[in-house]
Protein backbone atom coordinates (compact mmCIF):
# COMPACT_ATOMS: atom_id res chain seq x y z
CA UNK A 1 0.00 0.00 0.00
CA UNK A 2 1.53 3.30 -1.08
CA UNK A 3 1.56 6.05 1.51
CA UNK A 4 1.59 9.74 0.74
CA UNK A 5 3.61 11.14 3.59
CA UNK A 6 4.39 10.15 7.18
CA UNK A 7 2.04 7.49 8.61
CA UNK A 8 3.76 6.33 11.77
CA UNK A 9 0.64 4.69 13.21
CA UNK A 10 -0.41 3.04 9.93
CA UNK A 11 -3.54 5.16 9.78
CA UNK A 12 -3.87 4.31 6.10
CA UNK A 13 -4.95 0.83 7.20
CA UNK A 14 -8.18 2.40 8.50
CA UNK A 15 -9.02 4.00 5.15
CA UNK A 16 -11.20 2.33 2.55
CA UNK A 17 -9.89 1.51 -0.91
CA UNK A 18 -12.01 4.32 -2.31
CA UNK A 19 -10.60 6.82 0.19
CA UNK A 20 -7.04 5.77 -0.61
CA UNK A 21 -7.69 6.09 -4.34
CA UNK A 22 -9.19 9.54 -3.87
CA UNK A 23 -6.16 10.65 -1.85
CA UNK A 24 -3.83 9.28 -4.50
CA UNK A 25 -5.73 11.13 -7.23
CA UNK A 26 -5.57 14.39 -5.28
CA UNK A 27 -1.89 13.88 -4.47
CA UNK A 28 -0.96 13.26 -8.09
CA UNK A 29 -2.99 16.24 -9.28
CA UNK A 30 -1.24 18.57 -6.86
CA UNK A 31 2.22 17.23 -7.62
CA UNK A 32 1.79 17.22 -11.41
CA UNK A 33 -0.42 20.23 -12.06
CA UNK A 34 -0.04 22.62 -9.13
CA UNK A 35 3.45 22.36 -7.65
CA UNK A 36 5.16 23.37 -10.94
CA UNK A 37 3.29 26.71 -10.95
CA UNK A 38 2.75 27.62 -7.29
CA UNK A 39 5.93 29.63 -6.74
CA UNK A 40 5.22 31.88 -9.72
CA UNK A 41 1.65 32.51 -8.56
CA UNK A 42 2.75 33.07 -4.95
CA UNK A 43 5.29 35.66 -6.05
CA UNK A 44 2.85 37.41 -8.37
CA UNK A 45 -0.09 37.23 -5.98
CA UNK A 46 -2.32 35.36 -8.44
CA UNK A 47 -4.40 32.18 -8.47
CA UNK A 48 -4.05 29.52 -11.22
CA UNK A 49 -7.52 29.91 -12.72
CA UNK A 50 -6.68 27.40 -15.45
CA UNK A 51 -6.86 24.63 -12.83
CA UNK A 52 -10.41 25.38 -11.66
CA UNK A 53 -12.13 23.27 -14.32
CA UNK A 54 -9.69 20.43 -13.65
CA UNK A 55 -10.51 20.54 -9.94
CA UNK A 56 -14.17 20.38 -10.87
CA UNK A 57 -13.68 17.52 -13.31
CA UNK A 58 -11.93 15.51 -10.59
CA UNK A 59 -14.91 16.00 -8.27
CA UNK A 60 -12.97 17.95 -5.66
CA UNK A 61 -15.59 20.71 -5.19
CA UNK A 62 -18.20 19.94 -2.54
CA UNK A 63 -17.08 16.32 -2.72
CA UNK A 64 -19.05 15.06 0.27
CA UNK A 65 -22.32 16.58 -0.96
CA UNK A 66 -24.76 14.31 -2.82
CA UNK A 67 -24.31 13.96 -6.56
CA UNK A 68 -27.66 15.69 -7.13
CA UNK A 69 -26.27 18.71 -5.25
CA UNK A 70 -23.20 19.00 -7.45
CA UNK A 71 -20.96 16.91 -5.19
CA UNK A 72 -19.44 13.47 -5.57
CA UNK A 73 -21.18 11.71 -2.70
CA UNK A 74 -17.92 10.56 -1.11
CA UNK A 75 -17.31 10.14 2.61
CA UNK A 76 -16.34 13.11 4.74
CA UNK A 77 -13.03 11.38 5.39
CA UNK A 78 -12.41 11.25 1.64
CA UNK A 79 -13.28 14.94 1.41
CA UNK A 80 -10.83 15.63 4.23
CA UNK A 81 -8.11 13.71 2.41
CA UNK A 82 -8.69 15.85 -0.70
CA UNK A 83 -8.25 19.04 1.32
CA UNK A 84 -5.22 17.48 3.05
CA UNK A 85 -3.54 17.08 -0.33
CA UNK A 86 -4.67 20.47 -1.70
CA UNK A 87 -3.24 22.31 1.29
CA UNK A 88 -0.13 20.21 1.09
CA UNK A 89 0.26 22.13 -2.15
CA UNK A 90 -0.77 25.52 -0.81
CA UNK A 91 -3.42 27.09 1.42
CA UNK A 92 -4.62 29.13 -1.55
CA UNK A 93 -5.62 25.97 -3.40
CA UNK A 94 -7.37 24.42 -0.41
CA UNK A 95 -9.09 27.73 0.40
CA UNK A 96 -10.54 27.90 -3.10
CA UNK A 97 -12.01 24.41 -2.85
CA UNK A 98 -13.11 24.88 0.76
CA UNK A 99 -14.98 28.12 0.07
CA UNK A 100 -16.62 26.69 -3.04
CA UNK A 101 -17.73 23.50 -1.31
CA UNK A 102 -18.30 24.36 2.35
CA UNK A 103 -19.33 28.00 2.21
CA UNK A 104 -21.19 28.27 -1.10
CA UNK A 105 -22.41 24.86 -2.27
CA UNK A 106 -23.24 23.67 1.25
CA UNK A 107 -25.64 26.51 2.19
CA UNK A 108 -27.38 26.30 -1.18
CA UNK A 109 -27.69 22.53 -0.70
CA UNK A 110 -28.84 22.82 2.93
CA UNK A 111 -30.98 25.97 2.85
CA UNK A 112 -31.69 26.78 -0.79
CA UNK A 113 -34.88 26.43 -2.80
CA UNK A 114 -35.23 23.82 -5.53
CA UNK A 115 -34.79 26.57 -8.11
CA UNK A 116 -31.62 27.87 -6.43
CA UNK A 117 -30.15 24.38 -6.27
CA UNK A 118 -30.89 23.68 -9.92
CA UNK A 119 -29.51 27.05 -11.02
CA UNK A 120 -26.24 27.05 -9.11
CA UNK A 121 -25.10 23.68 -7.78
CA UNK A 122 -24.27 21.80 -11.01
CA UNK A 123 -22.06 24.63 -12.32
CA UNK A 124 -20.39 25.20 -8.95
CA UNK A 125 -19.61 21.50 -8.60
CA UNK A 126 -18.04 21.34 -12.05
CA UNK A 127 -16.00 24.51 -11.55
CA UNK A 128 -17.90 26.22 -14.37
CA UNK A 129 -19.17 28.77 -11.85
CA UNK A 130 -17.34 30.28 -8.87
CA UNK A 131 -18.83 31.35 -5.56
CA UNK A 132 -17.84 33.36 -2.50
CA UNK A 133 -19.13 33.74 1.05
CA UNK A 134 -19.81 37.15 2.58
CA UNK A 135 -19.94 37.20 6.38
CA UNK A 136 -16.91 39.09 7.76
CA UNK A 137 -17.14 42.89 7.71
CA UNK A 138 -14.58 45.68 8.20
CA UNK A 139 -15.71 46.12 11.81
CA UNK A 140 -17.13 42.69 12.60
CA UNK A 141 -14.96 39.60 12.44
CA UNK A 142 -15.15 37.38 15.54
CA UNK A 143 -18.39 39.12 16.56
CA UNK A 144 -20.10 38.21 13.30
CA UNK A 145 -23.54 38.61 14.88
CA UNK A 146 -22.92 42.34 15.14
CA UNK A 147 -22.91 42.72 11.34
CA UNK A 148 -23.94 46.07 9.93
CA UNK A 149 -25.04 44.83 6.49
CA UNK A 150 -28.80 45.23 6.18
CA UNK A 151 -31.57 43.69 4.07
CA UNK A 152 -34.74 45.76 4.10
CA UNK A 153 -38.06 44.63 2.72
CA UNK A 154 -39.07 46.42 -0.46
CA UNK A 155 -42.38 45.17 -1.80
CA UNK A 156 -41.85 41.59 -2.93
CA UNK A 157 -38.07 41.89 -2.66
CA UNK A 158 -35.20 43.23 -0.61
CA UNK A 159 -32.70 46.10 -0.67
CA UNK A 160 -29.24 45.19 0.62
CA UNK A 161 -26.66 47.69 1.86
CA UNK A 162 -23.29 47.08 3.46
CA UNK A 163 -19.81 45.72 2.89
CA UNK A 164 -17.92 42.48 3.46
CA UNK A 165 -14.17 42.11 3.96
CA UNK A 166 -11.52 39.43 3.42
CA UNK A 167 -13.67 37.50 0.95
CA UNK A 168 -11.92 34.63 -0.85
CA UNK A 169 -12.78 34.54 -4.57
CA UNK A 170 -14.80 37.77 -4.20
CA UNK A 171 -13.93 39.48 -7.48
CA UNK A 172 -14.14 36.31 -9.59
CA UNK A 173 -17.36 34.96 -8.08
CA UNK A 174 -20.45 34.46 -10.20
CA UNK A 175 -22.55 34.21 -7.05
CA UNK A 176 -22.02 35.47 -3.50
CA UNK A 177 -23.70 34.02 -0.41
CA UNK A 178 -24.19 37.24 1.57
CA UNK A 179 -25.51 37.40 5.12
CA UNK A 180 -27.45 40.48 6.26
CA UNK A 181 -29.84 41.57 9.01
CA UNK A 182 -33.46 42.32 8.23
CA UNK A 183 -35.66 44.96 9.88
CA UNK A 184 -36.14 42.68 12.88
CA UNK A 185 -32.38 42.06 13.27
CA UNK A 186 -32.81 38.51 11.98
CA UNK A 187 -29.82 37.29 9.95
CA UNK A 188 -30.75 36.03 6.50
CA UNK A 189 -28.75 34.67 3.58
CA UNK A 190 -29.02 35.99 0.02
CA UNK A 191 -27.56 34.91 -3.30
CA UNK A 192 -26.15 37.95 -5.09
CA UNK A 193 -25.20 37.59 -8.72
CA UNK A 194 -22.24 39.19 -10.43
CA UNK A 195 -23.32 42.26 -12.38
CA UNK A 196 -26.22 43.29 -10.16
CA UNK A 197 -26.67 47.06 -9.92
CA UNK A 198 -24.98 48.39 -6.81
CA UNK A 199 -22.96 45.24 -6.19
CA UNK A 200 -19.18 45.51 -6.69
CA UNK A 201 -15.89 44.06 -5.48
CA UNK A 202 -12.30 45.17 -5.15
CA UNK A 203 -9.27 42.96 -4.61
CA UNK A 204 -7.12 43.42 -1.52
CA UNK A 205 -3.46 43.85 -2.42
CA UNK A 206 -0.26 43.86 -0.41
CA UNK A 207 -0.87 40.53 1.33
CA UNK A 208 2.18 38.68 2.59
CA UNK A 209 0.07 35.61 3.34
CA UNK A 210 -2.25 33.55 1.11
CA UNK A 211 -0.71 35.27 -1.86
CA UNK A 212 -1.86 32.58 -4.28
CA UNK A 213 -5.48 33.35 -3.41
CA UNK A 214 -7.84 36.09 -4.54
CA UNK A 215 -9.09 38.10 -1.56
CA UNK A 216 -11.62 40.87 -2.00
CA UNK A 217 -13.93 43.40 -0.42
CA UNK A 218 -17.60 43.32 -1.41
CA UNK A 219 -19.68 46.49 -1.52
CA UNK A 220 -23.47 46.62 -1.73
CA UNK A 221 -25.19 49.94 -2.32
CA UNK A 222 -28.97 49.67 -2.65
CA UNK A 223 -28.78 46.26 -4.27
CA UNK A 224 -32.34 45.22 -5.17
CA UNK A 225 -32.97 41.48 -5.15
CA UNK A 226 -36.20 39.49 -5.48
CA UNK A 227 -37.30 37.29 -2.60
CA UNK A 228 -36.26 34.32 -4.75
CA UNK A 229 -32.65 35.35 -4.01
CA UNK A 230 -33.15 34.65 -0.29
CA UNK A 231 -32.11 31.30 1.15
CA UNK A 232 -35.51 30.15 2.43
CA UNK A 233 -34.40 27.26 4.62
CA UNK A 234 -32.71 29.12 7.46
CA UNK A 235 -32.72 32.31 9.48
CA UNK A 236 -30.52 33.56 12.30
CA UNK A 237 -26.81 32.97 12.94
CA UNK A 238 -27.36 29.22 12.67
CA UNK A 239 -27.06 29.67 8.91
CA UNK A 240 -23.57 31.13 8.60
CA UNK A 241 -22.24 29.29 11.65
CA UNK A 242 -23.25 25.91 10.23
CA UNK A 243 -21.33 26.80 7.07
CA UNK A 244 -18.28 27.71 9.14
CA UNK A 245 -18.44 24.32 10.85
CA UNK A 246 -18.08 22.69 7.44
CA UNK A 247 -15.15 24.93 6.52
CA UNK A 248 -13.38 24.49 9.85
CA UNK A 249 -13.60 20.74 9.44
CA UNK A 250 -11.73 21.08 6.14
CA UNK A 251 -9.12 23.36 7.68
CA UNK A 252 -8.30 20.75 10.33
CA UNK A 253 -7.48 18.29 7.55
CA UNK A 254 -5.69 20.92 5.48
CA UNK A 255 -3.34 21.93 8.29
CA UNK A 256 -2.34 18.29 8.67
CA UNK A 257 -1.40 18.23 4.99
CA UNK A 258 0.51 21.48 5.28
CA UNK A 259 2.50 20.15 8.25
CA UNK A 260 3.18 16.92 6.37
CA UNK A 261 4.75 18.81 3.49
CA UNK A 262 6.92 20.89 5.82
CA UNK A 263 8.07 17.79 7.70
CA UNK A 264 8.85 15.80 4.56
CA UNK A 265 10.69 18.71 2.92
CA UNK A 266 12.87 19.21 6.00
CA UNK A 267 13.54 15.49 6.40
CA UNK A 268 14.63 15.05 2.79
CA UNK A 269 16.92 18.08 3.12
CA UNK A 270 18.41 16.95 6.43
CA UNK A 271 19.38 13.57 4.99
CA UNK A 272 21.31 15.25 2.17
CA UNK A 273 22.74 18.36 3.84
CA UNK A 274 26.13 17.60 5.39
CA UNK A 275 27.86 19.64 8.07
CA UNK A 276 31.10 18.58 9.76
CA UNK A 277 31.26 14.79 9.38
CA UNK A 278 27.74 13.68 8.44
CA UNK A 279 24.25 14.71 7.30
CA UNK A 280 22.53 17.04 9.75
CA UNK A 281 19.82 14.36 10.19
CA UNK A 282 22.42 12.39 12.15
CA UNK A 283 22.73 14.93 14.96
CA UNK A 284 20.81 14.54 18.22
CA UNK A 285 19.21 17.97 18.26
CA UNK A 286 17.92 17.57 14.71
CA UNK A 287 16.52 14.13 15.48
CA UNK A 288 14.75 15.55 18.51
CA UNK A 289 13.03 18.06 16.23
CA UNK A 290 11.88 15.37 13.82
CA UNK A 291 10.60 13.21 16.68
CA UNK A 292 8.50 16.07 18.01
CA UNK A 293 7.23 17.00 14.55
CA UNK A 294 6.18 13.46 13.69
CA UNK A 295 4.49 12.94 17.04
CA UNK A 296 2.37 16.05 16.61
CA UNK A 297 1.49 15.18 13.00
CA UNK A 298 0.41 11.71 14.15
CA UNK A 299 -1.79 13.22 16.86
CA UNK A 300 -3.41 15.49 14.28
CA UNK A 301 -3.93 12.61 11.83
CA UNK A 302 -5.71 10.56 14.48
CA UNK A 303 -7.85 13.54 15.45
CA UNK A 304 -9.07 14.35 11.94
CA UNK A 305 -9.70 10.71 11.05
CA UNK A 306 -11.87 10.25 14.14
CA UNK A 307 -13.58 13.57 13.45
CA UNK A 308 -14.34 12.50 9.90
CA UNK A 309 -15.80 9.18 10.99
CA UNK A 310 -18.03 11.00 13.49
CA UNK A 311 -19.10 13.43 10.78
CA UNK A 312 -20.05 10.53 8.53
CA UNK A 313 -21.99 8.95 11.41
CA UNK A 314 -23.78 12.22 12.19
CA UNK A 315 -22.39 12.40 15.73
CA UNK A 316 -19.87 15.23 15.29
CA UNK A 317 -20.54 18.55 17.00
CA UNK A 318 -19.15 21.99 16.28
CA UNK A 319 -17.15 22.10 19.51
CA UNK A 320 -15.20 19.05 18.39
CA UNK A 321 -14.51 20.80 15.10
CA UNK A 322 -13.25 23.84 17.04
CA UNK A 323 -10.82 21.63 18.94
CA UNK A 324 -9.43 20.14 15.72
CA UNK A 325 -9.14 23.50 13.96
CA UNK A 326 -7.50 25.07 17.01
CA UNK A 327 -5.07 22.23 17.66
CA UNK A 328 -4.03 21.60 14.07
CA UNK A 329 -3.39 25.25 13.26
CA UNK A 330 -1.01 25.53 16.22
CA UNK A 331 0.59 22.22 15.27
CA UNK A 332 1.16 23.26 11.65
CA UNK A 333 2.41 26.70 12.69
CA UNK A 334 5.04 25.16 14.97
CA UNK A 335 6.09 22.50 12.46
CA UNK A 336 6.49 25.02 9.63
CA UNK A 337 8.76 27.08 11.87
CA UNK A 338 10.84 24.09 12.90
CA UNK A 339 11.14 22.89 9.31
CA UNK A 340 12.38 26.31 8.28
CA UNK A 341 14.99 26.18 11.05
CA UNK A 342 16.28 22.84 9.77
CA UNK A 343 16.56 24.25 6.25
CA UNK A 344 18.74 27.09 7.52
CA UNK A 345 19.31 30.02 5.18
CA UNK A 346 17.95 28.00 2.26
CA UNK A 347 14.64 27.92 4.10
CA UNK A 348 13.86 31.57 3.48
CA UNK A 349 13.60 31.10 -0.29
CA UNK A 350 10.73 29.75 -2.37
CA UNK A 351 12.99 26.88 -3.41
CA UNK A 352 11.60 25.16 -0.31
CA UNK A 353 7.95 25.21 0.72
CA UNK A 354 7.99 25.75 4.53
CA UNK A 355 8.44 29.54 4.38
CA UNK A 356 5.43 29.77 2.03
CA UNK A 357 3.39 27.55 4.35
CA UNK A 358 4.55 29.64 7.32
CA UNK A 359 3.17 32.78 5.74
CA UNK A 360 -0.11 31.10 4.77
CA UNK A 361 -0.69 29.62 8.22
CA UNK A 362 -0.83 33.12 9.69
CA UNK A 363 -4.06 33.64 7.74
CA UNK A 364 -5.49 30.21 8.47
CA UNK A 365 -4.64 30.62 12.16
CA UNK A 366 -6.89 33.70 12.18
CA UNK A 367 -9.73 33.04 9.74
CA UNK A 368 -12.77 30.82 10.30
CA UNK A 369 -12.50 31.65 14.00
CA UNK A 370 -9.39 32.83 15.80
CA UNK A 371 -7.46 30.63 18.21
CA UNK A 372 -8.96 32.57 21.10
CA UNK A 373 -12.55 32.18 19.85
CA UNK A 374 -12.17 28.42 19.48
CA UNK A 375 -10.65 28.26 22.96
CA UNK A 376 -13.76 29.90 24.39
CA UNK A 377 -16.12 27.74 22.33
CA UNK A 378 -14.53 24.66 23.87
CA UNK A 379 -14.35 26.29 27.29
CA UNK A 380 -18.06 27.01 27.27
CA UNK A 381 -18.80 23.43 26.28
CA UNK A 382 -16.64 22.13 29.13
CA UNK A 383 -17.99 24.43 31.86
CA UNK A 384 -21.46 25.34 30.63
CA UNK A 385 -20.59 29.01 31.18
CA UNK A 386 -20.10 31.48 28.33
CA UNK A 387 -17.02 33.70 28.57
CA UNK A 388 -17.76 35.70 25.39
CA UNK A 389 -19.32 38.66 27.19
Image: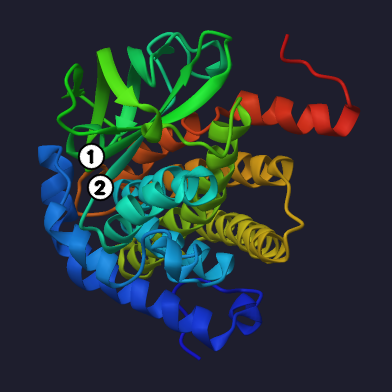
Q: Nearer the viewer, residue 178 or 377?
A: 178
Residue beneath the point at 43% across and 77% down: 22
Residue beneath the point at 73% across and 47% down: 317
- Up-down relation of residue 66 to residue 138 (above or below): below
Tell me residue 122's x, y (percent).
32, 61
- Can residue 332 be spotted in the picture? no
- Up-down relation of residue 150 to residue 125 (above or below): above
Seen in the image, is 294 located left or right of residue 29?
right
Tell me residue 300's x, y (percent).
62, 56
Looking at the image, is mark 2 or mark 1 earlier in the sequence?
2
Residue beneath the point at 16% across and 20% down: 197
* Secondary structure category for the residue under label 1: loop
The image quarter containing residue 134 is top left
Residue bearing mark 2: 130
Residue beneath the point at 43% across and 46% down: 336
Q: Residue furthest bottom?
A: 1
Tell me residue 292's x, y (percent).
61, 55
* Secondary structure category for the residue under label 2: loop
Which image quarter is the C terminus in? top right
Q: Residue furthest front?
A: 155
Mark 2 to mark 1 CA distance (whole Å): 5 Å
- State yes or no: discs 2 and 1 in contact (Cβ < 8 Å): yes
Crowd around label 1: few <14 · some 14–19 · many ≥20 (10 Å): some
Seen in the image, is 367 located left or right of residue 195?
right
Give the number of the disc on residue 173: 1
The image quarter containing residue 56 is bottom left
Amino acid sequence: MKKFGPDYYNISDDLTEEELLIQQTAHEFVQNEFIPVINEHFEQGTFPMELVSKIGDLGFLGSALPIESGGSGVSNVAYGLILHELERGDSGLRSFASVQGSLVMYPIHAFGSIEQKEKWLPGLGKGELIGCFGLTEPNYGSHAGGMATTAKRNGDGWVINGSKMWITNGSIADVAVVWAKDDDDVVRGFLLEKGMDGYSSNDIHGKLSLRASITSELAMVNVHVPDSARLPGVEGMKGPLSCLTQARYGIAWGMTGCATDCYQTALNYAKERKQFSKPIAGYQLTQAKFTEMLTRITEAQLMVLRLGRMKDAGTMNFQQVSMAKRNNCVMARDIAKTAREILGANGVTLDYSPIRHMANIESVFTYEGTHEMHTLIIGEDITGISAFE
